[in-house]
Amino acid sequence: MKLAVFDDYRLGVVQDGAVVDVSRAIPGHDSDPVGAGWWIRLCRDFDRLKPALSDAAATGERKPLAAVRLRAAALNPGKIVAAASNYAAHVEEMQSRAAELGLAREAASGWMAEFGVFLKAPSSIVGPGEAVLLPQDRVQARKEIHHESELAVIIGKGGRDIPAEQAMRHVLGYTCAIDVTIRESSDRSFRKSFDSFTPIGPWVVTSDEIGDPYGLRIRLSVGDQLRQDVCASDMSVKIRDIIAFVSSALRLDPGDVILTGSPPGVGQIADGMLMRTSIDGIGVMENPVWVRKAR
Ligand code: MN
């Protein structure tokens, strides 16, 4: 099932180029994005709510996708946990570019080469069609600001100390994300958490529909230039092991987002560009890039 948040924070099921409003099947649904407890409960209770959602999808109001405003496919998650250094070819490209990017080589070959996770601020989330805003001071200082296209995992049932063998049962579904990153020496969470630095969408495809996520192909193009193109099977640390690793330290809650790491091909974004992220079996998300003027 493809779950979309659209217009006035309605819940939709996407079918054949249309979105069907199924909000009435969600107990306590409301249109206030603050809190958005209904989304978190949906993530937790999807298995139980699925029959009612299917019924509502068969009879609800249908609108063409082109006629609605899609919102981010993650509403007020408690946290975004992001994997670093999870594709060997991306680690290599960062090592070879360390000097150009003004990073110490030992930094690029040390912490940067090792798998780990970090947190991004949920306030950095934007939806499909929304602009990624580059801070004017970093643009003027000629800092490189990069796109990292990533497969995003949305957590269904939460838990702590989740064993790897059971981890996939905690996955509600998958969507596309971009982990926008300023290449500078400030704290990693800070330089990746500027407002608008985490586009997520266009919708969540539930894991029962995806099946094996390692068949998914992740692509990002800028204009007509294909920059990132990888199969999720190239991931070094697989989703089940990321969930086990994270939940050994941080409780995972329903609705939490896990970004699974960037494939190779990261590159500079600049004012006026249009990023197009796509994952086969999920969908396409487009985000323009603008400079946010300093006040
Ligand atoms: Mn990343």
Image (cartoon, helix red, strand yellow):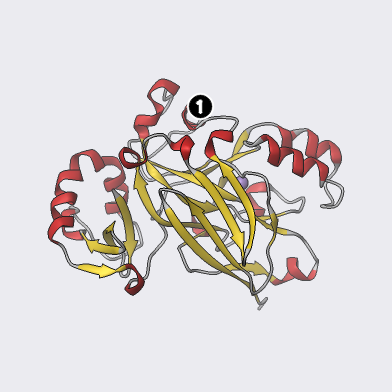
* Residue at horizontal 32 percent and vertical 48 percent from the top: 40
Categorize mark 1 by other alpha carbons within 10 Å: few (<14), some (14-19), many (20+).
some
In percent of width and height, residue 276 lies at 54, 61
Q: Residue at x 48, y 68 (%)?
A: 129
Q: Is residue 120 above or below residue 162?
A: below
Residue 93 vs residue 79, the one in the foreground: 93
x and y percentages locating residue 295 in the rendered image: 66, 78
Q: How many marks?
A: 1
Give how far across and how far down residue 237 sits, in percent: 57, 29
Q: Is residue 75 shown left or right of residue 30?
A: right
Ligand 1 within 8 A of label 1's CB?
Answer: no
Above/below status of 104 relative to 276: above
Height in image: 288 above or below 235?
Answer: below
Residue 115 sits above or below residue 36 on the image: above
Q: Is residue 95 left or right of residue 282?
A: right
Residue denoted by label 1? 241
Q: Quadrant of residue 275?
A: bottom right
Q: Residue at x 27, y 59 (%)?
A: 12
- Residue 253 shown left or right of residue 97 in the figure: left
Q: Amino acid at mark 1?
A: Asp
Q: Is residue 51 left or right of residue 279?
A: left
Q: Secondary structure at mark 1?
A: helix
The residue shown at (77%, 33%) is 110
Find residue 89 and report its horizontal and vertical position in percent: 70, 38
Q: Nearer the viewer, residue 215 or 184?
A: 215
